[in-house]
Image: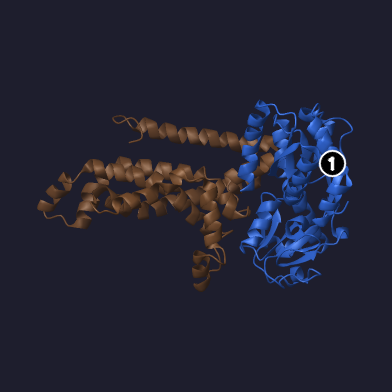
Chain colours: A blue, B brown
Amino acid sequence: MMIRASRLAPLLAAFALGSAHADEVQVAVAANFTAPIQAIAADFKKDTGHTLVAAFGATGQFYTQIKNGAPFEVFLSADDTTPQKLEAEGETVKGSRFTYAVGTLALWSAKEGYVDTNGEVLKQNAFKHLSIANPKAAPYGLAATQVLAREGLADKVKDKLVEGQNITQAYQFVSTGNAELGFVALSQIYKDGKLSSGSAWIVPSSLHDPIKQDAVILNKGKDSVAAKALVDYLKGPKAAAVIKSYGYEL
Amino acid sequence: MPLTSADFSAIWLTVKLASLTTVILLLIGTPIALWLSHTRSWWRGPIGAIVALPLVLPPTVIGFYLLLAMGPHGYVGQFTQWLGLGTLTFSFAGLVIGSVIYSMPFVVQPLQNAFSAIGTRPLEVAATLRAGPWDRFFTVILPLARPGFITASILGFAHTVGEFGVVLMIGGNIPDKTRVVSVQIYDHVEAMEYAQAHWLAGAMVVFAFIVLLALYSSRKTKPGWS
């Protein structure tokens, strides 16, 4: 389970730091970016020799951990406001913030043919549970509530909403069939330019504020060669190709 | 007022969940504990181990299997759908079932110890006085095992209040249905609402201390677990 893993991560990271490998970088990664960063980490290791150690979780949760001394060197957020906030509070290396991906929201069902390509299924309202990520902590959850509001469905589906603590749990509720459908990150259900399973409506970005995902080097990564290398790598063409293949914009 | 109405409904929901869970556990835990304390069956070991499992298992394991089992493709989910009840995930009933499993050892074990401590002698004496099984239960076992029932109720209630992982995994964080205090605190922390998190979390610390104080102060003769 992601939440458990990410709680353990600072501890594991602390052990890793104890052995002081200069070629390791501790990264806090927003849950929606789990699959792409794993692909990128493999290439990164091959191309630069540095090892990327990732912890996955909700952006709000990482903010709290970073403010309380978590040993992360780079933070890949699911939004742009949290890195801005950390920057304003002096927790980051000045000038290191940049947008590494723009997220795409998708309405997804594990069942084939359940979600039509225009999202009409939402208006028909025949489902029992609609899964979203916690809008207070996860940017994809916030975007989902914006879509519902703009479609005039917020009140209609209010009693059907179930919340995952992060986008991974929102996905989990749908993939186990407990919720018929839910708003997830396209990156969770999309690979190499097509849907991996089930049916989905790729939500037009005009229906919600853009999900600009910013990365930043944290103070703990100030002198880390690997942290700098990772940020450069993320800006490069090889990483960009991977990021796009998971359905993100750049 | 430092606590919002959402906080109060989370508190009320938690009290409801813990009370109902405790009552159910006393009803099903008593026969299990009686059997465990008196049987010589080979099954004593395996059943005792199953009852104690939640002591050792991470709540995520219980939550994960409940999510699969109670979902539309799981055995429990297919049964409840066949009954016309739908699925139990994201419902208060589902939380009650999860809590009963999760808090089971905290009720069964104190009861089992209490029943074992009574031994067979008072029951044999009662039997020679022609007390039937029900009579023996209500007039001999129940009064003698009273401290065990009190401990079991307090621990069952308190442990359910402290439940988090299972609820998180099967609850879906729905106000008035599955958003209990522990989840509400987690939400406050994630949303960086530290002041509100403090009020609720502080209240939980006070509650837990008072419960344990009551428990340990009531035991004058036998210190320790029981």
Q: Position of residue A94 (x, y in %)?
A: 87, 30
Judge left or right: residue A90 versus residue B197: right
Judge left or right: residue B196 versus residue B80: right
Q: Position of residue A56 (x, y in %)?
A: 69, 44
Provide the chain ID for the residue under circle 1. A
Res A219 → quadrant: top right
Count of marks, rendered view: 1
Q: Residues within 10 Å of mark 1 (few under 14, many from 20)?
A: some
| Residue closest to the eye, B175 or A120 | A120
SS type, badge 1: helix
| Residue closest to the eye, B52 or B130 | B52
Q: Position of residue B138 (x, y in %)?
A: 24, 52
Judge left or right: residue B127 versus residue B143: left
| Amino acid residing under circle 1 | Tyr
| Residue closest to the eye, A79 or A159 | A79
The relative height of residue A103 versus residue A226 in the rendered view (above or below) is: below
Spot the residue most to the left: B128
Q: Position of residue A204 (x, y in %)?
A: 85, 62
Res B86 → quadrant: bottom right
Judge left or right: residue A201 versus residue B151: right
Residue identifier under label 1: A233
Q: Residue at x 31, y 49 (%)?
A: B45
Res A190 → quadrant: bottom right
Q: Residue at x 51, y 47 (%)?
A: B15
Q: Residue at x 58, y 43 (%)?
A: B182
Is any atom of residue B191 visible in this view? no
